[in-house]
Amino acid sequence: MAECRLQSAWAQTSSLMALLATIHRDPKKHRKPYKPDEFNPYRQKKKKRQGPATKEDLAFMKEMFEGLRKK
């Protein structure tokens, strides 16, 4: 419950921080407005997706799972 309260408080605080940073930003240096997630320590950054599996990846997985079947 305390963790939820902290996350809620940081959501509000980060929104205010983003608003102030956007108001005082130099549009030549930082073209896009700031987002609250940039200031919130509880927000996790989105992970980049990997590309499709390569032949080496598939061969490794096949070898690994065949070893599990034999046991």
Image: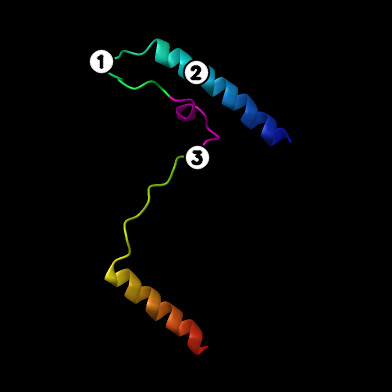
Left or right, 16 with reference to 22: right
| Three-letter code for the amino acid on which mark 1 is drawn | Lys
Which residue matches tag 1? Answer: 28
* Picture coordinates of residue 41, whole percent (x, y): 52, 32
Residue range (magenta): 35-43
Residue shown at 57% from the left, 21% from the top: 13
Q: What's the amino acid at mark 3?
A: Gln
Task: Between residue 63 and residue 51, name the one nearer to us.
Answer: 51
Q: Which mark is residue 67?
A: none
Up-down: is 22 above or below 39?
A: above
Q: Position of residue 36 (x, y in %)?
A: 49, 25
Horizontally, residue 17 falls left or right of residue 25, namely right
Magenta stretch holds residue 40: yes
Main secondary structure along the magenta-highlighted residues: loop
Element under label 2?
A: helix
**Which residue bears the numbered disc 2?**
17
Q: CA distance from mark 3 to mark 2?
A: 18 Å
Neighbourhood count class around disc 2 (C-alpha, 10 Å): few under 14, some 14–19, many 20 upward? some
Amino acid found under the numbered disc labelled 2: Met
The answer to whether mark 3 and mark 2 are in CB contact below 8 A is no
Relative to residue 26, is residue 8 depicted above or below? below
Q: Residues within 10 Å of mark 3 (few under 14, many from 20)?
A: few
C-alpha gap between disc 2 and disc 1: 20 Å
User: How far apart are the two marked residues, 1 and 3, measured between alpha carbons?
Assistant: 28 Å
| Residue highlighted by disc 3 | 44
* For marks 2 and 1 on the same chain, the one whose residue lies earlier in the sequence: 2
Residue 38, given in percent of the width and then of the height, sits at 45, 28
What residue is rendered at 68% in x and 34% in y? 4
